[in-house]
Image (tube, helix red, strand yellow):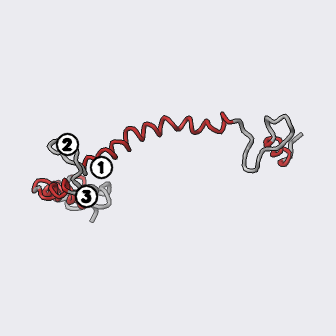
Amino acid sequence: MPIGKSSLLARSASAGRTDGATAAPGRTGRPFSERIAPFVLLAPALLIIVMFRLWPLVLGVNFSFTGDGEQDGAPVGLGNYAELFDDPVFRTALHNVGLLVLLLPVAVPSPACWRRSSSCGYPATGSSAASTSSPPCCRR
């Protein structure tokens, strides 16, 4: 015989109670070990993320605003960044990375259409018309 929805809810709400009282509103009446299990299972992953991702990030930000070996970690504010942007090698590297970020998304998919090869049927292969099996970008 199927159990009705209302009786199933009342039964699950009062599960584990011997005095016949129902659970407080918003609580499922599950034991503490079942409620805490997801947090216990997530704790090692969160600890690893904090240890190996967030803590080095915090240390890096801290080190960037403190002095080097000569100043024994004294706060220097934005002095390290001012010195960095005055360095011509850093500016050249920053320029090169900027070009890569801008041009790489265009340059990667394009060589298949720019390349002159035998698969595109160019005159170098002895054929003046593109073959029917060539990629669409090679057909003319």
Q: Which quadrant of the view contains residue 109?
A: bottom left
Tell me the number on the disc at residue 61.
Answer: 1
Q: Report whether 43 appears left or right of 114.
A: right
Tell me the number on the disc at residue 101.
Answer: 3
Q: Are marks 3 and 2 in contact (CB under 8 Å)?
A: no
Q: Measuring 47% from the left and 37% from the top, which residue is drawn there? A: 45
Crowding at dot 2, Cα within 10 Å, few <14 / some 14-19 / many 20+, comes out as few
Please determine whether, in this image, residue 127 is positioned above or below residue 62: below
Three-letter amino acid code at the position of disc 3: Val
Quarter holding the N terminus is top right
Please determine whether, in this image, residue 66 is positioned above or below residue 140: above
Of the two numbered discs 1 and 2 in the rendering, the one whose residue sits closer to the viewer: 2
Earlier-in-chain disc, 3 versus 2: 2
Label 3 vs label 2: CA separation? 36 Å
Q: Of all residues shown, which one is farthest toward the left?
A: 88
Q: Report whether 39 appears left or right of 130.
A: right
Q: Measuring 30% from the left and 49% from the top, which residue is drawn there? A: 61
Of the two numbered discs 3 and 1 in the rendering, the one whose residue sits closer to the viewer: 1
Query: SS at mark 2?
Result: loop
Instruction: Residue 53: give x, y in percent of width and height.
Output: 37, 42
Which residue carries the number 2 mark?
A: 72
Q: Measuring 43% from the left and 37% from the top, which residue is drawn there? A: 48
Crowding at dot 1, Cα within 10 Å, few <14 / some 14-19 / many 20+, comes out as few
Q: Are marks 1 and 2 in contact (CB under 8 Å)?
A: no
Label 3 vs label 1: CA separation? 24 Å
Earlier-in-chain disc, 1 versus 2: 1
Instruction: Residue 124: give x, y in percent of width and height.
Output: 14, 56
Residue 116 appears in view? no
Tell me the number on the disc at residue 5.
Answer: none
Q: Which quadrant of the view contains residue 112?
A: bottom left
Three-letter amino acid code at the position of disc 2: Asp
